[in-house]
Image (cartoon, helix red, strand yellow):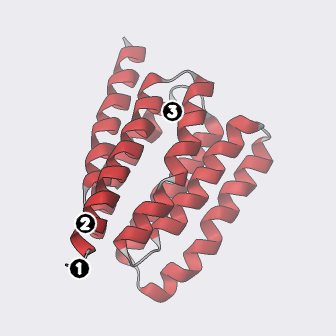
């Protein structure tokens, strides 16, 4: 029963992730993404993906901070988050299984610190690619769907933004 609940939580996280990536408003995208990421952390924790859980907690913290702090502090965060993710990867020594989430956090952190929504979405693309490979390695269908839907939603969102910004 516990395993089914973990899987359901993973699918709910997929839903929030998809909605977050579809949003063309930076703050709305971050807020919805925080909910999805929190649920995803629960999902991967119960799958015993320790480094990914810790790295995701770092990403969640950065997401929250990027909503509430001023731009000067945000610029400093960009150096802290990837360093913590890489330290976690090195400390836990999980090989590729630990490296992929760390790289995903680097992409996501850079994305969250962008002021331009198009640049934010473009940097975000690197993150779900890393995490999708990770999902395959741990055998989590919700994790794989989470990132496939993220890539699709990001692509749609990027297209909408480019279309909206196109001058006639």
* Label ID, residue 44: 3
Q: Which residue is mark 1?
A: 167
Q: Residue at x 58, y 73 (%)?
A: 78
x and y percentages locating residue 75 in the rendered image? 54, 82
Residue 118: x %, y % from top left: 37, 69
State the residue in front, 131 or 45.
131
Q: Residue furthest front?
A: 168
Disc 2 element: helix
Residue at the spot x=71%, y=51% of the render? 88
Q: Residues within 10 Å of mark 1 (few under 14, many from 20)?
A: few
Please name which of the two marks, 3 or 2, marks the residue nearer to the observer: 2
Task: Give the percent coordinates (x, y) of residue 92.
Answer: 76, 42
The reply to whether residue 38 is visible in this rendering is no
The x, y position of residue 128, in whole percent, is: 50, 45
Counting residues from the start of the chain, the first of labels 3 and 1 encountered is 3
Cα distance in 3D space between marks 1 and 2: 9 Å
Residue 46 appears in view: yes
Q: Disc 3 on helix, strand or loop?
A: helix
Query: In what quadrant of the picture does the N terminus appear?
Result: top left
Between marks 3 and 2, how big is the CA–CA gap?
36 Å
Q: How many marks?
A: 3
- Residues at circles 1 and 2 in contact by the CB criterion of under 8 Å: no
Query: Marks 3/1: CA distance?
Result: 43 Å
- CB contact under 8 Å: marks 3 and 2: no
- Which element type, helix, strand or loop, lies under badge 1? loop
**Disc 3 or 2, which lies upstream in sequence?**
3
Q: Which residue is mark 2?
A: 163
Dot 3, crowdedness within 10 Å: few (<14), some or many (≥20)?
many
Q: Quadrant of residue 70?
A: bottom left
Image height check: is 33 above or below 8? below
């Amino acid at each position: 029963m516990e395993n089914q609940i973990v899987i359901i939580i993973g699918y709910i996280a997929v839903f929030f992730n998809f909605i977050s990536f579809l949003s063309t408003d930076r703050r709305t995208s971050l807020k919805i993404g925080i909910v999805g990421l929190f649920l995803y952390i629960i999902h991967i924790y119960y799958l015993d993906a320790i480094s990914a859980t810790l790295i995701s907690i770092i990403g969640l913290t950065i997401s929250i901070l990027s909503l509430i702090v001023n731009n000067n502090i945000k610029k400093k965060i960009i150096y802290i988050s990837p360093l913590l993710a890489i330290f976690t990867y090195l400390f836990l020594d999980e090989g590729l299984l630990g490296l992929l989430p760390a790289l995903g956090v680097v992409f996501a952190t850079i994305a969250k610190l962008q002021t331009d929504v198009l640049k934010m979405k473009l940097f975000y693309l690197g993150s779900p690619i890393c995490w999708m490979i990770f999902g395959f390695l741990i055998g989590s269908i919700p994790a794989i769907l989470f990132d496939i839907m993220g890539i699709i939603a990001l692509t749609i969102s990027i297209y909408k933004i480019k279309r909206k910004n196109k001058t006639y």
